[in-house]
Image (spheres, rainbow, N blue to C red):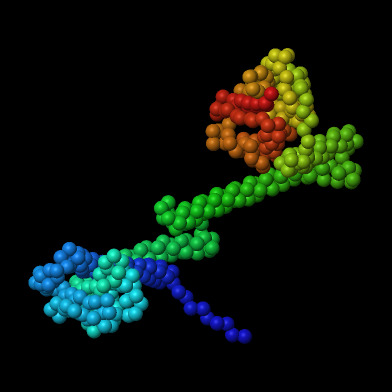
Amino acid sequence: MTRLKQTKFRYFYQQFSSHISIIIVAFLLLSLLFAHYLENLVYRNKADELISYGKAILSDIKENPYATEIVLNKYSSVLPARKISFSLFDRDGKLYLVSNRGPEIKYLPREDWESLKKGKTIIVQSDYKRFDQDGVTFVVLPYLENGKFYGGILLTSPISGSLEMIQEINKILLYTILIAFGVSFLQSWYLSRIHVKRIRRLREATSQVSKGDYNVHVQSSNYDEIGELANDFNHMVDKINTSMAEIESLENRRRQFMADVSHEMRTPLTTISGVIEGLKNNMISEEDKERGINLVSQEAKRLIRLVNENLDFEKIRSNQIQLMKEEIELLEVLEIIQEQLSLQAEEKNNQIIVESAPEVYVKADYDRLIQILINITKNSIQFTREGTIWLRGREEPDSVVIEVQDTGIGIDPAEVEKIWRRFYKADISRTSNPYGEFGLGLSIVKQLVLLHNGEINVASEKGKGTKFIIRFPK
């Protein structure tokens, strides 16, 4: 089966051909209309002139019926200077007075003759073959008296001078068309090349993108569709670059997370495996067996916590949890957090202080609120030694504000926005500790706050501590 080869008709030639054809057609139409209008104007002016003379002659004859010959002699001496000839004819069409080279009426068609008898003026502008003369304008006026037809007058005038003028004007129009064609040819060629260059740039940029090179940018504008297309193309490339950067960041974080998880899981798994092998082979003494079993239990709980944090984050992120909101006394919740984490705080010689009025209530899910505050407070304990951690609560006109502030090591400004990312861990936290070591705690906190239609912000200064500010709407 053979495939027919398609012939390409390049965009340059399409643009160029369309421009030229439109200009040619427009000029030809305008030239034809102008020539036709001018020709009709010349004939109409000549016909009006002949009619005015014809009416003047007939009027003078009516006023002086006995001086007809004097009237005719007067006009016979005047009209030849205007190159006008005339003839008088009777009701039967017979000529009874003919001026110098006056026309004859024997070839007047029957329908025109009948119209003439009814008082209609006959004008012949272009069909010269009705008479034995060419290149002239004819006008026939009836002579009526009391509604009765007695004959009429036939006037004629050559239009050779007018035709020459029309021909000269047509020649000028032809030259104008040729000049306009030349100018339009150059302009169309120039504009078509500009458009083709812009399209070629877009095509080359698209080809680069298809090859995986997204660092391209084309010149854009807002004054035509090609410029807007270039704007859209640049916007698309920027979006692709942003997406690629996000993908690369996610991939790097995924690798780091896998490395961190592998590192975190290796230690407890190695410990668990070693203790079990020791128990199995009776390599652990009786007095150390209880200590080994407790160690296995702690490491197993640590692995379970890692799995639970990942599952919890996925549930929150995919909106699979349902909040049971209720009015909660904030002071009571903060005191519970203080009590639960007091031992951990004492291990680092930290002090937890609660500051909140009893009448402050927050509408939230109790379990999730406890989870939020425990995660943040544990984070503060982790990075504070021999310092103070404040748990504050207060009421504002539109919201309830909870603050967790510490006097710890603080966060570098470059790291502040990164702490909410999943799997993210600052370098300082790469130590073995049981609280938030997997980089998921603060990610879960932010998702839970957003589910409450709240907002969370952090203010920190290196070496001077960190403050977490949570706002829940009333």
Tell me: residue 167, above or below residue 447.
below
Q: How many marks?
A: 0
Residue 50 appears left or right of 469? left
Q: Position of residue 272 (x, y in %)?
A: 82, 42
Tell me: residue 233, above or below residue 38.
above
**Residue 442 is drawn in which quadrant?**
top right
For this orientation, the residue located farthest to the bottom is 1
Tell me: residue 5, above or below residue 74.
below
Q: Position of residue 107 (x, y in %)?
A: 28, 83
Tell me: residue 16, above or below residue 106.
above
Residue pictured at 46% horizontal, 64% vertical: 204
The reply to whether residue 24 is in sight is no
User: Which one is in front, 442 or 406?
Assistant: 442
Residue 380 appears left or right of 105? right
Residue pictured at 64% horizontal, 40% vertical: 421
User: Which one is in front, 354 or 316?
Assistant: 316
Q: Position of residue 129 (x, y in %)?
A: 28, 82
Q: Position of residue 31 (x, y in %)?
A: 30, 69
Residue 463 appears left or right of 132? right
User: Which one is in front, 453 or 315?
Assistant: 453
The reply to whether residue 320 is in sight is yes
For this orientation, the residue located farthest to the top is 358
Looking at the rendered image, the quarter that the C terminus falls into is top right
User: Which one is in front, 438 or 42?
Assistant: 42
Residue pictured at 64% horizontal, 22% vertical: 398
Looking at the rendered image, the quarter that the N terminus falls into is bottom right
**Residue 56 is drawn in which quadrant?**
bottom left
Residue pictured at 61% horizontal, 25% vertical: 467
